[in-house]
Image (cartoon, rainbow, N blue to C red):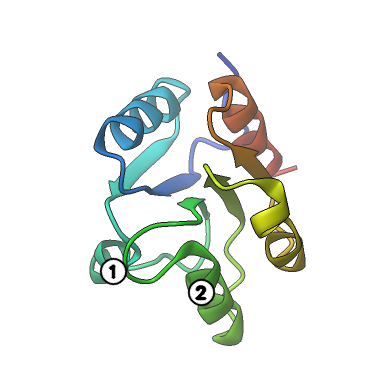
Amino acid sequence: MLAPRSKGLHVLIVDDDDSLRRALARTIRLAGFEVDAFRSVEALMAHGVPDRDACLVLDVDVPGIGGIEFTRTLAAAGRDLPTIFITALEPGQVGKPLAALAPVAVLYKPFDKQDLLEAIGRVRD
């Protein structure tokens, strides 16, 4: 496993797939990061979104407020939270809108957990 770049980095996961969300949280915790996981953007918002020392692992296609819409809302509010998008959608469906948001990474499901940990590690580089 990749050692964390910053032990103080808080990783926020949003994915509506319960088993994937739990597996990602476990993997990221084992790598030494603080993790909170949410079923929806609305649940994350109710918990509170940190202003710094955090990154998002955000599913593009979640029920309610979607990942792209949420990221645009954060940007419009002047909140620049590093984001790693995860998606089961095809690159042709979401590639351009995601690229415009300048994410840390876009990972297409199924993806290798090591790729996710490397992307999280780039947040502090």
Mark carried by residue 42: 1
Task: Pick the residue in front: 105 or 11.
Answer: 105
- Which dot, 2 or 1, sits closer to the camera? 2
Q: Which residue is mark 2?
A: 69
Which picture quadrant has residue 42? bottom left
Specify the amino acid type for callout 1: Glu
Residue 102 in the image: above or below residue 125? below
> Which comes sooner in the sequence, label 2 or label 1?
1
Count of residue discs: 2
Q: Position of residue 95 (x, y in %)?
A: 72, 55
- Residue drawn at x 38%, y 57% is 62
Residue in the picture at 70% in, 48% down? 91
In depth, the one of 23 and 66 nearer the eye is 66
Residues at discs 2 and 1 in contact (Cβ within 8 Å): no
Amino acid type for the residue under numbered disc 2: Glu
Spatial separation of the CA atoms under disc 2 and disc 1: 12 Å
